[in-house]
Amino acid sequence: MIIRKLFLCIFIILIALTSNAFGRDGVHGGKWWHDSSISKKLSLNENEIQKIDALFVESTRRIIDLRSTIMKDRFELRNLLESRTGNEAAVIEQFNTLEKTRSAIALERLRFLIRVREILGIERFREIGSYSENSRKERHRKN
């Protein structure tokens, strides 16, 4: 249960980090570390920015490949569901394959976060979460 809650918290932080640089309309394409206010607040140096950029590229490539696999898995599942034979075991097996691929995407996002945490250290990593929360509250007040 604790692991699920931890995973959920990390996933929420990941969504905040990779989506639209904290609500700034995607100015940096989700690359929050290129936002000058964030990089200044975290005291990011050029070497750290380059490392995070490299991680982002690697991770994004893997996620793109996994999304392609999900499309194929969905197609196969739909094909099995629409077939006249209705092989329940094959449908369930294909569904499980699809779910494993979806889970692999979440795991890749988590690995990206863990690697970013290794680069930044735990204190600066925690600052990202508080910055994200404050930014979210500010956007909510404006709306």
Image (tube, rainbow, N blue to C red):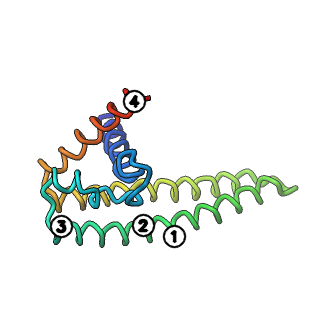
- The residue singled out by tag 1 in the image is 65
Mark before the other along the chain sequence, 4 or 1: 1
Q: Quick one: label 3, few (<14), some, or many (20+) residues within 10 Å?
A: some
Mark before the other along the chain sequence, 1 or 2: 2
Q: Quick one: label 2, few (<14), some, or many (20+) residues within 10 Å?
A: some
The relative height of residue 55 versus residue 43 in the rendered view (above or below) is: below
Camera-side residue: 87 or 54?
Answer: 54
Q: Amino acid at mark 1?
A: Asp
As helix, strand or loop, the secondary structure at mark 3 comes to helix
Residue under the image location 31 percent in, 55 percent down: 32
* Disc 4 + disc 3, Cβ < 8 Å: no
What's the distance in space between the residues labelled 3 and 1, CA to CA? 26 Å
As helix, strand or loop, the secondary structure at mark 1 comes to helix
- The residue singled out by tag 4 in the image is 142
Q: Amino acid at mark 3?
A: Glu
* Disc 1 + disc 2, Cβ < 8 Å: no
What's the distance in space between the residues labelled 3 and 2, CA to CA? 18 Å
- The residue singled out by tag 3 in the image is 48
Mark before the other along the chain sequence, 4 or 3: 3
* Disc 3 + disc 1, Cβ < 8 Å: no
- The residue singled out by tag 2 in the image is 60
